[in-house]
Image (cartoon, grey):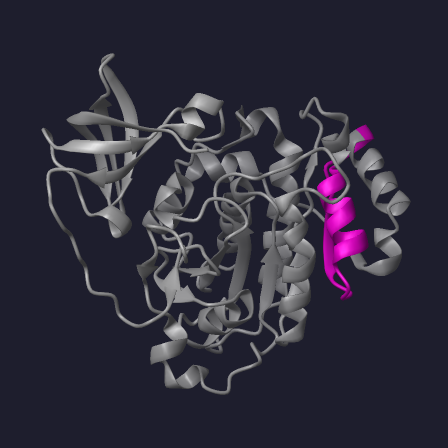
Amino acid sequence: MPSFRTGVVVRLLEERRGLQRVEVDLGDGPERAYVLTQLTGPVAVGDRVVVNTTAVELGLGTGGWHVVHWNLARAEWREPGPGHVLKVRYTSLQADVGSTEEHEAALGEADDVGGMPVVVAGLHSQVPAVAVAFKDAAPGARLVYVMTDGAGLPLALSDLVAALTGRGLLDATVTCGQAFGGDFEAVSVYSALAVARHVAGADAVVVAMGPGVAGTGTRLGFSAIEVGPVLDAAAAVGGRPVACLRASFADPRPRHQGLSHHSATALGLACRSRVTVPLPLVGGLEEETLRAAVAAAGLDVRHEVVAVKPPDILGLFAQHGLAVSSMGRPAAADPVLFAAAAAAGVVASERMFPLNPGVG
């Protein structure tokens, strides 16, 4: 059951499109909270607010942030939406965000993305590695991020996406399903790929859920299993699906050491199409272990496994001033995870058919 408390906003920490970060005094001194302004409107210092404290009390992955549920300083608030498509449906926060499909004539009969590479990752934290590697290889090409609803729903919460768009490493964002807040809204992952190609002008796309990932330690009970059906969706609309492996030699959990069981299951069981699987050439025992795990899972039979020399991903992060981490570990502590994503970005740059000839 949810937990709610009432407090007073005492400080505004940060503000960007769709998001405020604030300090709220809930009676025991200032505590951190964020405001999704697209759902509740903005707050100001001195406003009394109702705060959802559930995730912090449970020690979940919000990083110690409460969520402002409502601002008691106002009796009502409304912001007209652009259409009639609701997201966060059937909750008290359902919002009319509209959808790109409602307004763009080019999408009326669109069901093909013209061979566009679609990189699909199971971790939000791998998106920066895909992006910097792609842009390093094809600086003139347009890369669009499609965020699914497999984890966090508000795109505004992603510091990584804010940093990538601010540095020109992502050219546009599309939020699909119940995820919201992108430059473009889409009803499904299928239509999101069409929006990316035909409206946002993508030469390539990276698809991944938002911040957060759910796992239970069971074979099927994890949110990143969506990688399989998303790859199938990319193939169905005429894309060139590229699977980003989850691989780590820093994760202490046996099921994620070497090739993560998330990738083995998503690609071995949940994905029904034949897709490209870049295997990063990281050298030494780590590469041998990864190759053996890919073979043991039968991925080299079911899919096209291609060996790829990834770029210096840590150097590219530093070059762009990006501080990237995953599961609390900085990129330098888990380089193979990001090398695998960078390899997928390289493959995407090599396999695109630019929307505008001459790009790349």
Would residue 92 appear left or right of 7 to someone viewing this image? right
The image position of residue 255, as x and y in percent, is: 76, 31
Q: Is residue 277 left or right of residue 27?
A: right
Q: Foreground: 97 or 286? A: 97
In the image, 300: left or right of 101?
right
Q: Which residues are magenta?
A: 260-285
Q: Does the rendering let one see residue 17?
A: no
184 falls in the magenta region? no
Q: Position of residue 173 (x, y in %)?
A: 41, 59
The residue furthest top is 28
Decide: is 217 above or below 333: below
Residue at (75% x, 30% y) in the render: 257
Relative side of 121 to 2, left or right: right
Residue 118 in sight from this viewpoint: yes
Residue at figure coordinates x 38%, y 29% from the top left:
3
Q: How many marks?
A: 0
Say which of 188 and 5 sits in front: 5
Q: What residue is shown at x 61% (from left), y 50% (from top)?
A: 121
Up-down relation of residue 120 to residue 246 (above or below): below
